[in-house]
Amino acid sequence: MIGVDTNILLRWIAGDSLAEDAASHQLELVQQLANGSEELFVNQIVIVELVWVLRQRARLAKAAVAELVTRLLHATNIVVHERETLLAAVDSYSRFPGGFSDHLLGEINKRNGCRTTLTFDKAAAKSPHFSELKR
């Protein structure tokens, strides 16, 4: 198994279109990794960064990003830490306002026994994982 960072994952998903410094040989290397028999480990931080880049830089719609991440999490050669937590966060992200990192944070807290997560973030507070703390 080999760990990958966000830049490697982006090149695999989007090719060179999102990489300012990309060279075609880099894309070839990433494709060889992704299509090989080696499993790729993707941690939660990489998924959070990936969502941010796809939303902010690539300007993909929230629904499209949620679908892409869901497919990625189900890929046979992708190993992720806490897959079910990430899938639940993607589901929450697709149904409620707020950023993906908010939904992942809420899901992690829930799975660790928190009945709620306090926030000042009005958008995140619309998710059942959060309670808005009024200023």
Image: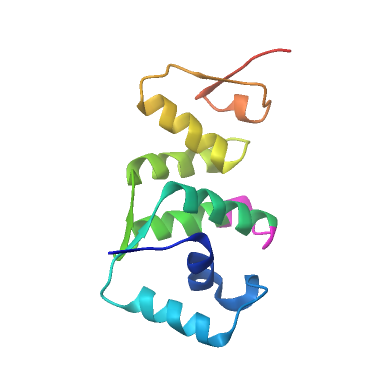
Q: Where is 81 relative to 21, above or below?
A: above
**Residue 94 highlighted magenta (yes or no):** no
The residue sitting at 67% across, 63% down in the picture is: 58
Q: Quadrant of the rendered structure where residue 65 is?
A: bottom right
Residue 33 pos. (x, y %): 37, 76
Residue 117 pos. (x, y %): 52, 21
**Residue 62 highlighted magenta (yes or no):** yes
Residue 34 pos. (x, y %): 38, 74
Q: Where is 85 relative to 116, above or below?
A: below
Residue 35 pos. (x, y %): 35, 78
Judging depth in this view, the residue of 115 and 38 nearest the camera is 38
Q: Where is 83 relative to 39, above or below?
A: above
Task: Give the quarter of the figure containing the C terminus.
Answer: top right
Range shown magenta: 57-64
Q: Where is 2 relative to 47, above or below?
A: below
Judging depth in this view, the residue of 135 and 20 nearest the camera is 20
